[in-house]
Amino acid sequence: MSQEEAKRGQILELLKVHKITPKQASDQLRVSPRQVRRLVKRYQTEGMEGLISKKRGEPSNRRLNDLVRAEVTRLVGTLYPDFGPTLAHEKLTELHDVSLSVESTRQLMIQAGYWKPRRGNTVNHHPMRERRQRFGELIQ
């Protein structure tokens, strides 16, 4: 159980013993009063386990299909290993009718080792000077 879920349980317990109002609970939980009513109903029937997300440990509904993932990796590896993600995406869309986003294509290329991300390789050409130890001090 996460910290947020434990806090949610404490607030709902205060609501149960009438220490706070549903409006105050909705403000503290940052949800609507209707959502608080739904949470209270689930808390009464299932207890603290009812406040834990039902999707925990499950794969995302938005994940890429494994067959599509394998097909794109195979196509890029055989036909476009030296292409960048944008051009590979365009070729996959035009010639192979595979509809992926550029970012999905990029992520697949990184995982397969066909593309290296360039983030973090920047060199600071103009580093900031250190602050002076005393106000008004300058080097003459």
Image (cartoon, rainbow, N blue to C red):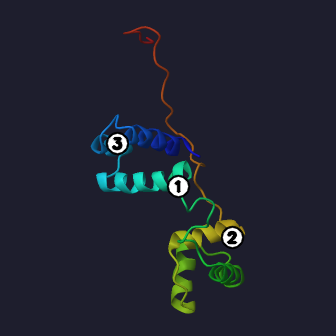
Badge 3 is on which residue?
Answer: 25
Real-space Cα distance between discs 3 and 2?
51 Å
Q: Is there a contact, CB below 8 Å, between mark 1 and mark 3?
A: no
| 3 or 2: tag closer to the N-terminus | 3
Q: Which residue is drawn at 50% across and 75% down?
A: 101
Residue 138: which quarter of the image? top left
Pick whichever, 89 or 45, lies toward us. Answer: 45
Pick whichever, 84 or 34, lies toward us. Answer: 34
Helix, strand, or loop for circle 2?
loop
> For mark 3, does the 10 Å Cα neighbourhood hold few (<14), some (14 to 19), or many (20 or more) residues?
some
Badge 1 is on which residue?
Answer: 46
Percent position (x, y) of residue 134? 43, 8
Which amino acid type is shown beneath numbered disc 1?
A: Glu
Real-space Cα distance between discs 2 and 1?
49 Å
Real-space Cα distance between discs 1 and 3?
19 Å
Q: Which residue is drawn at 53% across and 90% down?
A: 97
| 1 or 3: tag closer to the N-terminus | 3
Vertically, is 125 above or below 83? above
Vertically, is 58 above or below 92? above
Badge 2 is on which residue?
Answer: 114
Q: Residue 80 carries which label?
A: none
